[in-house]
Amino acid sequence: MSFQYPLGLLGLIGIPILVLIYIIKSKYTEQTVSATYLWTLSERFLKKKRKDNKLTGIISLILQILAIAIISLTIAHPVLTIPNGANEYCFILDSSGSMSMEMENSKSRFDIGKEKIKEIIEDSGNGSLYTLICVDNNTTTVFEKETDKDDALLLLDELQSGFGSQSISTALSKAQSYFDANKGALTYLVTDKAYSETENIELINVASAKDNYALSDVTYDYSVLGNLTVNGYVTSYESDAIINLQAIAGEESAQKEVSVKKGEATKFSFDLYIESFDSATVKILNSDALSLDNECVLYNVNKANSYKTLLISKTPFFLETVLKSVGSESITVMSPEDYLTKEENKSREIKGYGLYVFHSCNPKAVPDDGSVWLINSTASIENSGFNYQGEIKLDKAENITKTKASASTVRKLLSDVDGSEIYVSRYSKYDTYRNFDTLFTHNGNPVIFTGVNTYGNREVVFAFDLHNSDLPLLADYVFLVNNLIEFSFPSVIDEAFYECGEKAQINIVSNCESIRVESPRGKISHLSTNEIVSEFQLDEIGVYTVTATIAGQVRSFNVYSAMADDEKDPVTDNEGKISLLGEASGEGFDGIYDKLIIFFICLAVIMAADWVVYCYDKYQLR
Amino acid sequence: MKNSIINEEFLQQIEALQTLIRNNVAGLFGGTHQSKTYGSSCEFADYRDYIPGDDITKIDWNAYARFERLYQKLYLDERQMHTKIYIDASRSMEYGRADKAEQALRLAATIAYLSLNEMDKVSIYAIRDKEVIEIISGMVGKDSYIGEIGKLNSLEFNGDSHISDAIIPTNVGYGDGMSVIISDFLTDNDYENAINHLADKKRDVFCIQVLSPDELNPKIRGKVHLYDSESVEKVYRKNIKKDIMQAYRKALEYVQERINTVCASRGASYLLVSSEDQMGDVFFGKLVEKEVLK
C-alpha cells in the first residue's frame, strides 16, 4: 500500500499529543463543595460495576486515537498496488461523417463506438493509462495518458461526431509512438471502415448494412433570362430504390422520382424558372440511415459578388460599353459637373458604390468607400496617391511601353494584353507618392498604373483620355478592363459549394474590415483581413454564413459544405492493412486500487460519531 | 441583612398574607389568630344557656323575646402566637455559587415580618454545633422590626450543626405558634427528633430546605477530589460520569423524600427552596400552594 499524499500522515502526530492531554487530564482536580453528604450518599444508589467496566475509562481515548489515525490515513489517500493489474490503452475513434449513420435504437455508429470504448475503460484495471484520438479531417487527441478513469469516461461522453473524411495516418503515427514507448500498450481502432489485416491493433468495426441515399456533384446553370437548371447525381448504396427528389429555389419547387440501381450514381436534372436566383436546395425525401448527405444547397456566386458602379463622364460611351461587356450590371452615369456639385454639398447620392470611374473629372478627393478609376485627371486629387505635374503634348501619337515587371499582380493585370499597339497623342504627367504598380509608361512617365490609395481602396489610373488613344479600338481594351475590374473589385467568394474537410476561400476586398464565419452548429470564427485571400476549414456539413464588413457595409454570403463522397457508403470495401510496427510484449504494469479512501472516510466518520455518542452518553454533554 | 433584598414594597405586598396555624391551642391574648377556645373577639361562634354571673352584655335579647329564655352569645377567642425561627448556621450554608445563607436569612426575615404583621411575637435562633443561639428574642410589633432584624447581619455561618441536639434541650414553647427550621439538611446528624419534639409540643412545624443550584444540578464531571466545606475529613474522590450523576440524583431525591416523610408523619410542612428562587415566588407561590400561608 502506498499513499497519494503522504504529508497527510503528519496528522498522526496528533496521537501522542492526544495521549499527553489524556495523561494530564487523568489527574484528579481538587474542588471544595458545600457538603459531600449527597455525593457520599450517592454511593448507595450506584449500580455495581462489572469488572470489564474498568476498560471504559480508556475507551474514549481509544476511539479518539482511532479517529485521528483514520482521518490522517484518509487525508494521505492510501492506494493499494495490484501487480500487473493495469495497461496502457490507446483508442483511435473514427469520427468521420459516416459514423453519424443511424443504427439500432436511434444510436449512431459513433455512439456505439463510444459505448465499446466505455466498456473497455470500465473493465480495465485502476491505474491504467488511457489515450483517445479522434480522427476525421483532423486528428484530435481528446485525452492523453489519462490516469483517472472517471475523467476519461466524462470526456468520452461529451464527444460529438465529426463530418469530414477519415484520415487515419496521423493517428496511427501517434499510436505508433505510444507503442514504441510501451510495447505492452493496447491499441484499438473503432471505425466503420473495413480493413483486411491489422497488426498490433484491435479493430472494432461498428458498421452494418443500412439503406443510405446520397446526392453528389450537384451543380446549377442560371441564365439571365431566368432559367435555372440544377443537375446532379443520386446514389443508393444498399439496394435498388425509387428515390423522391425535390428542388426548391425561392418560391419555386419541383419534385421527381428517380429509379436508382444499387451503387450506381444516377443523373437527375431540374428545370426551374426564377427571376432572381439567390439559392437552390435539392433534397432526397426518402428517409435513410444518414440524413447528412440527403440535402445540398447551391448559392449564386455572381449575385454574392455583384457591385454598383458610378461612372462620371461627359462622354461615357466607351467606358459604359466595356464595363457592361465584362459583367458590370448596375452602372449609374453622372456628369462631372453634377458630381462636383454633389461632392461640394456632401450629398449621400455619391456614396455606396463599389466602383467609382472618373473620366476627365477632377474630384476634390477620391471617395473613401470603394475602388476608384481615375482617367485623364488634370489636377491633383486629395488622397489619390499622386500629384498632377502638367500635360505632355506629343507631336504625333506615340507608342506606350508595356512594363517588363514580373510581379504576380502585374502579370495578372496584363494577362491576355498584348500592349504593343497602344498609342497616345497627349497625356498627363504625374508624380506618385505612394507605391503603384506601373503597367504602361511613356518616356519613363507612368501612363497606366494601379495601387492602393490613402483610404486603402484599390485605384487604377489612366494618364490619358481614351479619346486621345487607340486603346478603345483594340482587343487589348476589353482584356485590360476585365483584368482591372477583377483587380478593383475582386469577388468575395469564387465558389459556394465545397465538400466537408475542404478549405473555403474568401477574397479580401478593398476596405474589408472584418470577416466572421458561422458554422452550421453555430461555431463562430473570425478570419484575418491582412492577406489577399483568407481560408477557413469546413469541418461541419451544412450552410456556413460568411459576414464581411466592407467599408462600413455588412455583406453576407453563404457557403455550403456537403458530405464527402467517400463517407456516404454505409459499408466500405477493404481499406487495406493497418499496423503498428514492433512486437507487442503483452505485459501490463502495476495497477492501483484507490477506492480505499471511501472505506477510510466511512471508518473515520463512524469512529468520530462513536466517540461523540460515547461522550454524550458517558458525560451527559447536554 | 447582607443584601437589602427585603424591600419596603415587598413587605407591603406580603402584609396581605396570613399564616395558617393548626395547633393553635395556647398563646397570649391580643393576637390575631383564632383560638379553639371561646373568647372576646368579634366573631360569633355559638350560644349557651345564661349562667348567673355571666357578662350580661352578651345576652341575646332577641332570642329571649322569641324563646323567653336567656341565651349567652359566645365569640371565638383570638390569641397572640410566638413564632420561633431556627436558622442552620453551619458552614455548608454559606458555600456555593448562589449563597444559601443569604436565602435563609431572607426567608427568616420575611417570615418574621409576616408574623409581626399578625400581631405575633417572633424569636430568631441560630443553630451552630449543638447549640441554639438566640439572635432576636420576643420581637413584637412592626415598629421593632426595623431595629431588631438588622441583627441577622451579624450571623456567622461556621462549623457543623446538630439540629436535634440543639433544639430539644431548649424551651420551644407549647402550642403557642409556629417553629420554622431553615437548613440545607445535608447532614447525617439527626433532625427527625427535633421535628418530633416540636410536634409533641403542639407547635406548627415548618421545615424549609435551602439548596443551591450546584447541589440541585451539579456540573461536576470527570476525575475530581471533592472536599467538604465543613470538615476536611469528609472527602469524595471519583471519576464522575453518567452513572454517578444518576446515583447523585437518586440521593438527592432520597434526602428530600426523607424530610418530607418525617414532616408529613408529624403534620409538619416541608418546602424545598433554591437559593436562586425569588422571595415573591416562594411566598406567593410555593407557600400558598403548601397552605402554609393564605
Image: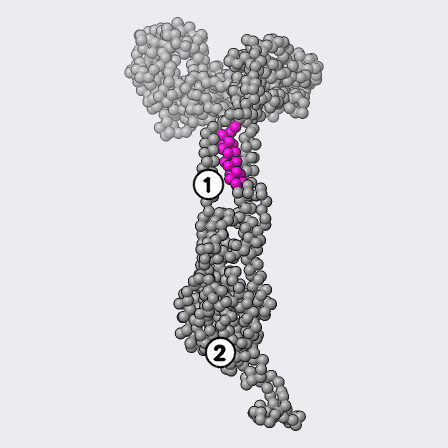
Residue at the spot 54% in from the left edge and 81% down from the top edge: B78
- The image quadrant where one finds the N terminus of chain B is bottom left
Characterize the local packing of mark 1: few (<14), some (14-19) or many (20 or more) Cα atoms within 10 angstroms: few
Q: Quadrant of the C terminus of chain B?
A: bottom right
Disc 1 target residue: A23
Residues rendered magenta in the picture: A58-78
* Residue B243 numbered tag: none
How many residues crowd mark 2 within 10 Å: few (<14), some (14–19), many (20+)? many
Under mark 1, the amino acid is Ile
Q: In the depicted view, which residue is nearer to us: B44 or A459? A: B44
Name the front one of labels 1 and 2: 1
Secondary element at tag 2: loop
> Residue pushed farthest left?
A389
Q: Which residue is mark 2?
A: B119
Give the quadrant of residue A508. Answer: top left
Q: Chain of mark 2?
A: B
Q: What amino acid is found at the position of numbered circle 2 in the picture? A: Met
Front-most of residues B35 and A446: B35
Residue A29 in percent (x, y) is at: 45, 48
